Structure formats: structure tokens, C-alpha cells
Image: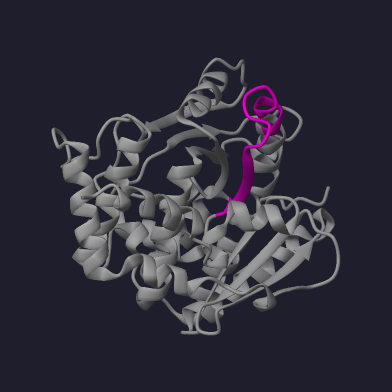
Amino acid sequence: MAFVKPNYSKGQVNRAGQILAAPEKYAADDQAWADAVLTNWRACHGYPINTFQATLRNKLRGIDAKALVAQRMKRTPSIVFKLRRFEDMKLARMQDIGGLRAVLDSVGKVRKLEAAYRNANFQHQLVSSKDYINEPKPDGYRGIHLIYRYANVRAPEYDGLGVELQMRTRLQHAWATAVETMGTFLGQALKSGQGDQEWREFFSKAGAALAIVEKCPPVPGFEGKASAEVYAELAEAEHRLRVLEKLNGFAIAADKITSERGQGAYHLIILDSAKRAVFLRPYPISRLEQANLDYAEIEKRTNAGEPIEAVLVSAGPIDALRKAYPNYFLDTQAFVAQISKVIAQVG
């Protein structure tokens, strides 16, 4: 089998998590060991999310055949941030290291897909769910999250691993893309609720406006406000920060996208924000372990200060990659177009 299997006990994985959360307390050898454990532990999620992806695509055929589907391994900085943010978080219990995303045309189709999963006769256990469409986050984020604990009698070595399934509309996806893209250029973790207050408020207002467009419950803080008031607040914030102008200027030209030759079920996407360039490295399933090792090496360079970001994903052809992970191509056209429409309604 080409998929990576666990090489460490859960106790060892949790020990590695402790080291990763506070590396200054440990020797260099301990830190190197923890890095190796994380690389293996993250890679082990490849098998569960691959089997989940097959099920997801099958369910989407009768709901939204044009839906975008992508899978990814959680980035090391995001894993470490979560370990540091929550003192009781154990690496072996982290439920979203392996993730899948479905991007559908409408809220109605998202709800149909959600129902298909909730009514499924799975051996996998649904351990947690979040409805951020009916109850959006204060920062404006919306979508559905279902978290499963994997179970498979034919591959028991993967039992207990967490798989997170995210479902969102194209508008919700456009908002999330813009947040990550702007965060990249500002050098701020806007996605994690950090960074300048003004920028966080802008995206909260943008999320509130898009919730109105989709006729969904309001973002916290915007309850009772008429659409005209929300749109006007958004227009004022956009004018002050020149958001659309900035986002339009970030887009990566086609000649700045470089891809190694070869076919791959997986791609390592490497974004150099300083050069505004993207490099794509394909890997067949037979080289998935090497892909995870290369992913870890790129993240070490990021941690050392290079202006690069990487993510290991599976989303089909390059065009599908760009649609599923537009933030790695600095592509915010869908967000810019929708926000421009909203602002145009302000008198």
C-alpha cells in the first residue's frame, strides 16, 4: 500500500505535540524527533481522507455535479498554533489534521449534502458538528463542519483518526479565500482571529453582507440591522482600506505559475508571496510518503523566515486546484465581484 502508516504510539504523538507547542523548553534532538513524529502522524491521515473523498464525490453526483472537491493535510503552523492556543489540546486527539472540502452552488445544496451525511449508515462515528451558516462566527465565517472518527475493519491501523468535512457555498468560499489572501500579504493571521482590528472588522462586515445576499441568519453583531445599513458600513470600510484595489493587485499572472512535468493524484502547492509566484509539484499516490517529507521541508523554510507557504492537496487537474485553493494563487476575483455588486447598491 502506498499510504503511510502510523510509526508512533498515541502517547508518543502527544509527547511530540508538547514539544512542538513549547520548543524552547527542549533540546534540538527532541525538537527534531517531534518534527519527525508530526510528519508521520499527519501523513497517516492520507488514507482516511482518500476514502472519504470517494464517498463525497459519490454523494455529490445527485446533488451538485459541478461542486468543487478538495482534500488537504493541515499545515504545521496551524497545528502548532492550535496546540499553543488550547492548553488541553492533545496532538493525537486533534480532529482536523485531515480535511475535505466541498464547495457547492447554493445553501440549499449544502443542506442536502449535510443531510446525506447525517442520514448515512456509516461505520465512522460523527463526533462533532458545527453549523456556522445558522450560527456564523463573529468574524464572518460561515459553513458546515462535520468531524468523524475513522473506522475501517479492512484497515484498522487508521481507526480513530479524525477527518473533518467542510461544506460551503461558492460565496462562503470566496469570503474565506479573501481572508487568507489578505492575511498572507499583511503578514497577519486574520483567519485565526489575529491581526489589525480594522481588517478583522472589514471581513466581519463582508461576511454579514454575504449572509444577507444568501438570505441566511446574520453574523453576530449585525442582528436587527437592515441590509442597506450593513452594505453602507461595508462600503465605508472598503473605501477607507482600499480592499478591492489591493486584492485586484495581488492576482498572480499565468506566467508566474510553474508546474513540474508529470501527473499526480496529489500536488504540493508552494506560494512565494514576495515574488507573487506559484510552483506546483505533482506526486502519484506511490510517492505520497515523499510528498509529505517534501511538505515538511518547505514548512521548515517558512519557519526560518522565507516568504513562502505550502499545502499538500488533492483536487484533480491544475484548473481544479486553482478553484479549490484560490488563496494559494492569490485569486480573489469571485470575492471582488460580489463585494463590488453589494457596494454598488449603496446610494
User: How many marks can you see?
Assistant: 0
Q: Residue at x 29, y 55 (%)?
A: 203
Note whether residue 94 is visible. Answer: no
Q: Is residue 233 visible?
A: yes
- Furthest toward the front, the residue is 347
Q: Looking at the picture, how far across and down is residue 65, in whole percent?
A: 68, 31
Q: Left or right: 43 with respect to 105?
A: right
In magenta segment, residue 151: no
Q: Give the colour scheme of this rendering.
A: one colour
Does 291 sit above or below residue 209?
A: below
Vertical relation: 171 (above or below) 178: above
Instruction: Provide residue 222's location: percent of width, then percent of height.
Output: 17, 40
Picture quadrant where residue 194 is located: bottom left
Q: Nearer the viewer, residue 80 or 187?
A: 187
At 49% from the left and 81% from the top, the residue drawn is 307
Image quadrant where residue 55 sits: top right
Q: What are the residue bounds of the magenta stretch? A: 57-73
Residue 114, image x and y in percent?
Answer: 51, 25
Asked if 199 appears above or below 4 in the picture, the reply is: below
Please report the residue visible at 67 percent of the width from the left and 49 percent of the height from the top.
46
From the viewer's side, name the closer residue of 40 and 135. 135
On the image, the x and y values in percent for residue 140 come to 30, 47
The residue shown at (49%, 32%) is 106
Left or right of 8 in this view: 284: right
- Nearer to me, 278 or 157: 278
